Image (spheres, rainbow, N blue to C red):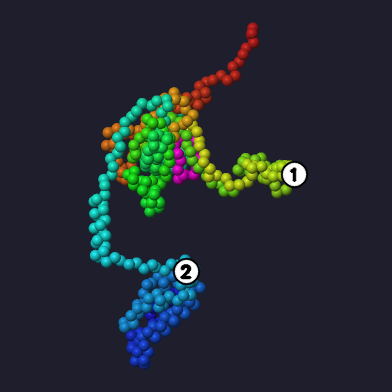
Amino acid sequence: MSICATGNSCALPTGAEASGAVALGVESSDLAAAISVDASDACRAASHGLASTSFRCLAREQHTLPDGWGSIGSQGLAASGLQLQQRRGYGYQPPKPRFRLPDSISTLVEQRMREQRRAAPAPPPAPKLETRPMAPTSLRTGCIATKAGMTQEWDEHGVRVPLTVLWIDECQVVGVKTRPVHGYNALMLGAGHRRQKCMAPSEAGFFLKAGVPFKKLVAEWQVSEDGLVPVGTAIGAAHWVAGQRVDVTGWTKWKGFQGVMRRWGFKGLPASHGVSLSHRAPGSIGNRQDPGKIWKGKKLPGCMGDERRTVHNCLVYKVDAARNLVYLRGQVPGPAGRSVFLRDSRLATPALRDSWGVPFPTHVPSPAELKAAPAPGDVSALPAPDGPGVGVWRNPTDPYLMYREETDYMPVKWKKGE
């Protein structure tokens, strides 16, 4: 007995029957072909009713027969063209042949890989930074962050503060542009990680020439001449200070095709008698014969969302430098997981910007911070959420003060003489 493609038992000849068949003059190849035809007919008959179990026939690479009969592969019991076509319709993919390298070649490949690793250049040392005085015309660089989601906290006055969490994922300077060469001063920053096989050779060559890891997203910020930093400088959450104002640029959520009420905030037609099935219609959209057309830019239904938007003057409520998290008060455009761009607020005056005390040109870690920092890629040393290096903005005014103190809102004015 043997198991055919349908999972049912198929009768195969025993050793005695096989010897008898040979004695009668029936060759082994003819008998094997007859067995395969019978098994194929049985599998084909049950393939429609037992489609889920018919996968087992091709999943088996070989079906062993009794001694002296060898083996019949997938071409024997279940490799008929009709069955293969049916199983491909159910989503089955035949196993691809895998070839193992000879021991001599595999050993040679391993040796060559070890030699390449030994001959690989050491990672470049971290660039040396120094703090500089910030002038009224100084302009710092921004950074690339990832929107992780939203949360909330309560300040010291008991007020609930809605917060957007931004994660800075290995943001690093990958290029420097100077005025003598390019005509303006700017820094090119990259964030995230990307495999070399997923990028063009020209892109990979840019990162290899700069000596920095491959980045997923690259953006550019114009800075002042005193705000330039060398290639390889890391821009983390310590680049920002709790209490300062920033501008956030992102892409809004994709809403699909929407009507005028959702897309543009139209009022709609009256929902009263005489208006039939057109309550959410835009109404009149043009004139008569003159001009006889619809003007460009008319607010009509269409695709909504996925547009570049900038939110100005957002408050940095909390900064977690150890985990590279920045908490902003309010909302940030875009869904969770989308990249956004951060920069110092352009609406702030130089006097207000000086009161923030932001590091310039960026945060320079102290020797104690470098010693306490975990090794790159060490996920076992997770910092505490409220550990050192966490700055929180303090609200100087209590919005509930007027309710806590006894305030006479309607003072009684007595008439003169009473």
Q: Badge 1 local density, few (<14 within 10 Å), some, or many (20+)?
A: few
Q: Is residue 174 above or below residue 352?
A: below
Looking at the rendered structure, the secondary structure element under dot 2 is helix
Identified at 66% across, 42% down, the residue is 295
Of circles 2 and 1, the one toward us is: 1
Identify the image quadrant of the C terminus. Answer: top right
Q: Which amino acid is tagged 2?
A: Arg
* Residue 346 in sight from this viewpoint: yes
Q: Which amino acid is tagged 1?
A: Gln
Identified at 35% across, 78% down, the residue is 71
* Image coords of residue 162 (percent x, y): 48, 36
Magenta stretch holds residue 368 = no
Identified at 46% across, 25% down, the residue is 349
| Residue farthest front in this picture | 180
Residue under numbered circle 2: 88
Quadrant hosting residue 224: top left
Q: Is residue 246 above or below residue 103?
A: above
* Image coords of residue 47 (percent x, y): 48, 74
* Image coords of residue 41 (percent x, y): 47, 80
Identified at 36% across, 48% down, the residue is 205
Residue under numbered circle 1: 289
Looking at the rendered structure, the secondary structure element under dot 1 is loop
Region in magenta: 325-342
